[in-house]
Amino acid sequence: MEDIKLMKGNEAIAYAAIRYGTDGYFGYPITPQSEIMETLMAEMPWETTGMVVLQAESEVAAINMVYGGAASGKRVMTSSSSPGISLKLEGISYIAGAELPCLIVNVMRGGPGLGTIQPSQADYFQTVKGGGHGDYRLITLAPYSVQEMADFVALGFDLAFKYSNPAMILADGIIGQMMEKVVLPPYRQRKTEADIRQESPWAVQGKLQDRKVNVITSLELDPAIMEENNNRFQAKYRKIEETEVRCEEFQCKDAEYLLVAFGSSARICQKAVELAREEGIRLGLLRPITLWPFPKKTIEAYGAQAKGMLSVELNAGQMVEDVRLAVNGQTKVEHFGRLGGVVFTPDEIIAALKEKLLKP
Amino acid sequence: MELTEIIKPENQVYGKPRLMNDNPMHYCPGCSHGVIHKLIAEVIDDMGMEEQTIGVSPVGCAVFAYNYIDIDWVEAAHGRAPAVATALKRLNREKMIFTYQGDGDLAAIGTAETIHAVNRGENIVIVFVNNAIYGMTGGQMAPTTLVGMPSSTCPYGRDVALNGYPLKIANLLAQLEGACMVTRQSVQTAAAVRKAKKTLRKAFENSMAGKGTSVVEFVSTCSSGWKMTPDQSNKWMEAHMFPFYPLGDLKNTE
């Protein structure tokens, strides 16, 4: 019997985290994602699975709690929204530099600054181009449904542990707040200390007699060794780019024109594709699920056959740069977006398509 | 009597702690860090907690503490050690967790993390080395730099009108319900070292007994930053630091 529930995307994250066997959640309230911690606190998983849930004094403290928990090999996560993620970037850089696995959720809102509490996708650059200091990459998953909010908790943790790298679920206020039916994942056991010592031999769990000390650090003063460390990170990133790209194609095979969109924008674009096809425009949609690694090859391949692409984003034009790099001049690539928390309609997308690509 | 007859295990009266390794220390001559490291290594060993202890090192002179004491360590971002330690302890309740932080780390950039970890009563030990200066970055003013005391960013002495007052953060922490022990110690004499070790052990025992947070401040010297010889530094500390940061327990819940 499937466990089907009706809930918000934020709530789905919380339930999926408990069921995944997450060891710890550390967060600080911020709209539009506060339901994640509220749901966890109401569920009291410390009495069932043993999961620790703690409201930290700041986003900065919360991400450093994640750093400490991850250092001990535990499955730990945090969540926030755009201004709070900016505060976490120091910690995220340290976590990436120390090669620790963890899950971070960003339910984006409009910026810059305190901005608005309405949905936005303006943190694309911040997430996939760095954000914090140094050459690091965040595995970035972009859910477009409440179901994917639930599913990407497991996927994010699995990828984070597979590559010893932080992973981020990059959602937005629409996905976080909207309610849909969702099939919750099955319960999994939390790891025991013996599991951790075996599966994550680097973790700080106390130095037993039979091994050397474990030190979790991102510091290395010798530039030659630091370069080696960076080369190791880069080799890992190339491997992730080769093996972990996820992208969904929606009516692309016969398409003359393509929309490229992620998250809630892709959801709206699906409707735009339907409406355009009713008008006789052969339109398709490419939906990057992983924003990093970015589906360069798929987009490059479609770039060779499409008459034009429209990158549809709730920002001033961020992912469009990666689409253009992938297409590499093979076809025309334009951007359409709304800013500051305003969300486009399918009709506006079709109007933009006509204006920017179909006009003779 | 030949030397070989004297140098025997049964005649040994003092030795390097077992958990201190042979890595050459980067600390300057006369620095208090070395003695405090030694005390921590001894206490962990005395308690038989080597396999259960995780240290959190700071940003500052003690950033490399993990190079000298053979236990598992996490190197935290500047000021964030109490947050890192919070999660380590909450997720690993049977482990013994401590942070090791300097005055800039604990009382400037990490003030929020420190106050809130102590206020939550995290079952951790916070070792706080207060030498009233930023040693690692080259002798800049610290939150604990005394009024009139020179540093590279207050070369004519700390001016209250410009920089405000030195922060007695231990007094502040002692007010918090979550703290079970807040104490000021020093390590400039043999007697002080013996007393400090006893206090440190009590702090670690508190953390394992779940009594709340123990904060052990070490009023310390920085010969290089203060531009004095080690001997002058100790005398200056006794004459100037101790009156402002008096030694002894600010809180000690039995």
Image (tube, coloured by chain):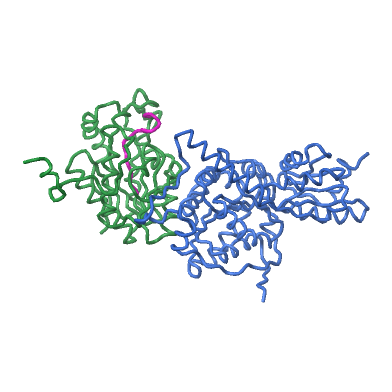
Q: Looking at the picture, how far across and down is residue B83, in whole percent?
A: 44, 50
Q: Looking at the picture, how far across and down is residue B229, in whole percent?
A: 24, 27
Nearest the viewer among B149 and B199 is B199
Q: Residue at x 21, y 38 (%)?
A: B188
**Left/right of residue B235 with respect to residue B88 in the rendered view:** left
Q: Residue at x 33, y 57 (%)?
A: B207
* Numbered disc total: 0
The answer to whether any part of residue B177 appears in the image is no
Q: Is residue A116 above or below residue B91?
A: above
Q: Is residue B135 above or below residue A258?
A: above
Quarter of the N terminus of chain B within the rendering: top left
The answer to whether any part of residue A319 appears in the image is yes
Instruction: Tell me which segment is drawn in magenta.
Output: B126-139
Q: Looking at the picture, how far across and down is residue B17, in whole percent?
A: 25, 47
Q: Residue furthest top?
A: B156
**Left/right of residue A337 with respect to residue B84 in the rendered view:** right
Nearest the viewer among A157 and A264 is A157
Indicate the chain coloured blue by its letter.
A
Nearest the viewer among B128 and A141 is A141
Q: Quadrant of residue B132?
A: top left
Quarter of the C terminus of chain B within the rendering: bottom left
Q: Colour of chain B?
A: green
Q: Residue at x 65, y 72 (%)?
A: A3
**Left/right of residue B200 with respect to residue B106 in the rendered view:** left
Residue B251 highlighted magenta (yes or no): no
Residue B129 highlighted magenta (yes or no): yes
Q: Looking at the picture, how far across and down is residue B176, in whole percent?
A: 36, 52
Q: Residue furthest bottom?
A: A1
Q: Quadrant of residue A332?
A: top right
